Amino acid sequence: MPPIVAKRMRPIWRLPARQIFKKLAQFALGWIYMLVRPIIPYEASPGKPERSLAVVTGKCTQEQLALCQRIFDEGVTRRHHIEQKAQWTFTAIAFLIPTIASVLFFFVKDAGVQRVDHPLLLVVIVGSATLLVLSFVSALRAMAIKHNESLFVHSVIEEESDEFRSYEVEFHAKGLLHCAVMNAAVNDHTAQFVKGAYTLLAIAVVGFALGIGVIGFDVTGTKGSPGDLLNGKSSSVTQQDGSEVKAKGVQCRREGPDEIMDEFP
């Protein structure tokens, strides 16, 4: 007999061609939605389920009541886990934004970067900065979601008569399940923001790393490495007037109509 075990997720290329195109379309739409989700306004609370738990009939045993309590507790545990991930992502973004901004400011102030001509590189850096901002907004919105439902006063006291309710196991179980259903919708909504936050953060960091790396290699190749200058190796840079500047050690000589010896400050 085959074991009662769920099958592992298969690569999409092993699916029929029609399902492959459907999966690719869902993947593309998911990425587009991930980019625009941080700026989309949402309702403050989830909608109530179409089927109300009030229509459920029958007797509830103590074992079923314990199961309802467990379902409710699992939702609370999941909410704490999602909130913790949102705080970690927000902290990482808050640390990376000033760090990356200072590195970019250093490169922009460097005269050598002004000679780097890579339009595509500029697009990558600007795109990465945009993704980083969207990641920050997504993490912030995930932390701002505080909607949570739990049993409160009116689960014990009648709202109209202000008298204590007669304890009913069924009423208690329905209240726990209602709170669990509503909290599950909130948790799913918050998890989407957290997932978008760290996904956009990862892409932004990779884009910044590639951009800064290319700029660094280009500038180093243009100006010559500091190690070569300290070791006394010569390097040359062509000036706009066609003359050539050769550097050796800490001295620089301009070859042209007038030979001038300059020293670095």
Image (spheres, rainbow, N blue to C red):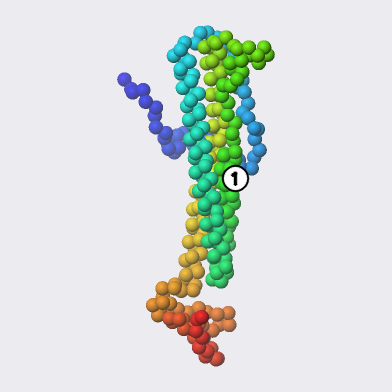
Which residue is at 59% across, 49% downward? Answer: 133
Q: Where residue 135 appears, x then y in whole percent?
A: 56, 46
Q: Using the image as rendered, state which of residue 244 and residue 177 is in the foreground.
A: 177
Q: Where residue 74 appears, x then y in whole percent?
A: 47, 27
Label 1: few (<14), some (14–19) or many (≥20) C-alpha neighbours in 10 Å: some
- The reply, left or right, for residue 257 in relation to residue 13 is right
In the rendered image, the vertical position of residue 249 relative to residue 150, given as above or below: below
Which quadrant of the rendered structure holds the N terminus?
top left
Q: Give the total of numbered labels.
A: 1
Task: Indicate the secondary structure of the residue bearing disc 1.
Answer: helix
Q: Is residue 194 visible?
A: yes
Q: Is residue 18 visible?
A: no
Judging by the rendered image, the residue that carries numbered circle 1 is 137
Which residue is at 64% across, 42% downward? Answer: 39
Q: Using the image as rendered, state which of residue 94 and residue 23 is in the foreground.
A: 94
Q: Where residue 114 appears, x then y in whole percent?
A: 57, 69
